[in-house]
Image (cartoon, rainbow, N blue to C red):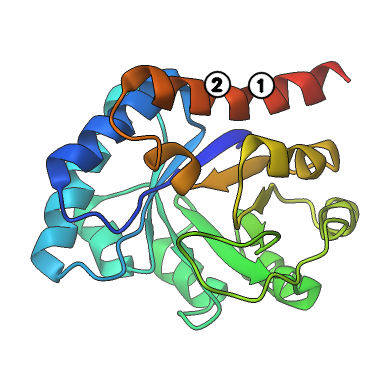
Amino acid sequence: MRGLYLVTPNWDDTDRLLDITEQALYGGVALLQYRHKSADAEQRREQAGALLALARKYGVPFIINDFIELCEELDADGVHVGGTDASVAQVRARLGSGKIVGASCYGDMALARTAAEGGASYVAFGGFYPSLVKKYPVTTPLDIVLQAKREIALPCVVIGGMTPENAAPLVARGADMVAAISSVFGKGSQADDVDIAVQQFNLLFAQAGEA
């Protein structure tokens, strides 16, 4: 779990969603999450199934935001839960030890510790910067990454307004993955633009590894 963590936007156009996702996967993605807050059950099943097939093609783990039943139905690789969803411990007990369970911890180390104790596979912090997609207080301090790396033996994900420039100081502090939506999906449908966006994120981790 190191690199770009690609999260899908609330797009109803499945063909467009799959096209840009595949371009990004080809460019190099560490983890793919299906997130569509306004889709109905049928659309979620259709899109998640198609994305799972793409993720399998490129050997990238595929997780689903919130919907545990859909994860079970498709045999996806795991679930990401937020602060108002089922607890990490409940999800871990239901899915077993073989699945990825990620947890949103916002800017709260207590939530991160509880998630770790409950069997989380990774902890996610943010928002650090204003987001074009999600509305939340931009109050998470950059140094929470340093604290998390000291206290919790789990991969650390950062989210919220992530661009390669914004993510750089967080990767320098030890963030293992950068979660991005608009910085990849907002590039239009030009393959070169998507590829450049992905490569810019991946370069951060290459540079951190050389430092």
The relative height of residue 182 versus residue 10 in the rendered view (above or below) is above
- Quadrant containing the N terminus is top right
On screen, residue 98 versus residue 169, left or right, reads: left
Q: In the structure shown, which secondary structural element does the residue marked by tag 1 occupy?
A: helix
Residue 63 visible at all? yes
User: Which residue is depicted at the point 22% across and 37% down?
Assistant: 18
Q: In the structure shown, which secondary structural element does the residue marked by tag 2 occupy?
A: helix
Amino acid type assigned to the residue bearing label 2 in the image:
Gln
User: Quadrant of the rendered structure where residue 10 is?
Assistant: bottom left
Q: Residue furthest bottom?
A: 84
Q: Looking at the image, do the residues carrying marks 1 and 2 touch, with CB atoms under 8 Å apart?
A: yes
Foreground: 35 or 77? 35
On screen, residue 130 versus residue 21, left or right, reads: right
The relative height of residue 29 versus residue 69 in the rendered view (above or below) is above
Callout 2 environment at 10 Å: few (<14), some (14 to 19), or many (20+)? some
Q: How many marks?
A: 2
The relative height of residue 197 versus residue 99 in the rendered view (above or below) is above
Q: Position of residue 19 (x, y in %)?
A: 22, 31
Q: Position of residue 142 (x, y in %)?
A: 83, 56
Amino acid type assigned to the residue bearing label 1 in the image:
Leu
User: Which residue is depicted at the point 83% across and 16% down?
Assistant: 210
Callout 1 environment at 10 Å: few (<14), some (14 to 19), or many (20+)? some
- Quadrant containing the C terminus is top right
The residue under label 1 is: 203
Q: Position of residue 143 (x, y in %)?
A: 88, 57
Q: Which mark is residue 195?
A: none
User: Which residue is depicted at the point 59% across and 54% down?
Assistant: 161
User: Which residue is depicted at the point 44% across and 52% down?
Assistant: 99
Q: Position of residue 123 (x, y in %)?
A: 65, 59
Foreground: 54 or 71? 54
Residue 181 visible at all? no
The residue under label 2 is: 199
